[in-house]
Structure formats: C-alpha cells, structure tokens
Amino acid sequence: MAAGADDRVRVDIRDLACFGRPARLVWSKRRWRCREVECPVKTWTERSVHVSPRALLTCRAGIEACRQVGELARPVSGVADELGVCWWTVMHAVERHGRPLVDDPARVGPVVALGVDETSFLKATLVAIGAALGIPIGIVLGRLLWGLFARAMNAVPAPTVAVGSIVLIGVAAIVLANAVAAVPARVAARTPTALLRSE
C-alpha cells in the first residue's frame, strides 16, 4: 500500500488541569491519502491510544474525571470547571470509564449478610400508630354521631360492636402489616448472590 501525507487537521483536546488551570492540547493530526486506485478507504487520519476518536478529553483526563466524581464524590460541575469543559463532557467520561467498573462482577465480594429495608419496618410502625389512634377516635366519633342520629329519631342508642372485637381488629391490622412487610425480605433472601452483586 502506497500512502502519503495529504494535509493536517487541528484538533483541540482538553487534558488534566495544570497548576490549577484548564489545559488544552493542540494536536495537528495528519490526514493520509492512499495512492492506490483500488483502495476502498482513500483517506484516513492518524490515531493515538491517548485520545479516543471524536473525544474532547484525553483518556487520562477522562479516567481522572471518573475517579473524581465516582470515588471522591466531587460534583460534576466542579470537575467540569477544573477541566474547562461542560457538564455533559464530564458525565460522558464518567459513563464511559465508570460503566466497566460498575459492571465488573468481581468489584463486590460474596454476600454474607443481607439487611432488610427500613421502609418495611416503617409500614408496620405506621399501621400500629394508625390502629392505636384511629380506632379509639373512630369509636368515639362513630358512637357520638350514632347517638345524635338515634336521638333525632327518638331511639335509644346502644353500642352494637363489642370492645373485644375492636381490639381484635387492631391486632389483626398490625399482624397483617408485618406479614406484608416481610414479603420483600423473603424475596430478597431467595435472590441469588450473583444477581445481588450485579444490581
């Protein structure tokens, strides 16, 4: 294959910050032209392992941006200002370099213990509070309104629901809430550890 340099293309690339200021590399990329008549490619530009095609950041700047955002929990906007690029450029670098780290099944060891979500306990607590407050208030208001209605009709109001039945309803509501809250824990306990690591 006979190839010759055709022309040069200026490419501006952001690199790691230098002395606290954004650094810009200017790469004068050579464009090559194939002199073979039957060549299907015709022209191409030179490449570098340090810069991905059509990238705005060098590979080392992208990796460092991913580390700053992912490992050090820095805000994306702060890293973007430091590199002199926009928010989306840093986020694309985080996605590109961070996704293989997240998808790596070896990044988390075997699951030895599994906790229960606190919202499951919160459900039971809310039901217990609702039963402790709602049932007595409901009984008092219900009997008061029934008494007013019965007296308006010249009838004698008398309670028709026993106190034991009301207490039983409250206890049943709390037991039912705990049973519903235990379902997610049972499902999680049966989930394979490999799947938990991937999530």
Image (tube, grey):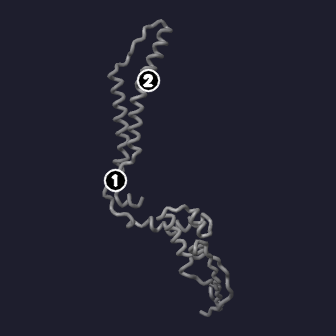
Measured from the top left, where is residue 188 in percent x and y?
Answer: 36, 51
Is 16 drawn above or below residue 99 in the view shown? below
Distance from label 1 to label 2 (Cα)? 40 Å
Q: Which residue is mark 2?
A: 138
* Front one among 182 and 62: 62
Q: Which mark is residue 78?
A: none
Spot the residue most to the left.
112
Which amino acid, mark 1? Leu
Measured from the top left, where is residue 152 in percent x and y?
Answer: 50, 9
Q: Which residue is mark 1?
A: 114
> On the image, which quarter does residue 135 sit in?
top left
For image coordinates 35% across by 43% down, the residue present is 182
Q: SS for tag 2? A: helix
For image coordinates 36% across by 44% down, the residue present is 183
Name the quadrant of the C terminus: bottom left
Q: Is residue 17 left or right of residue 155?
A: right
Is 5 drawn above or below residue 189 in the view shown? below
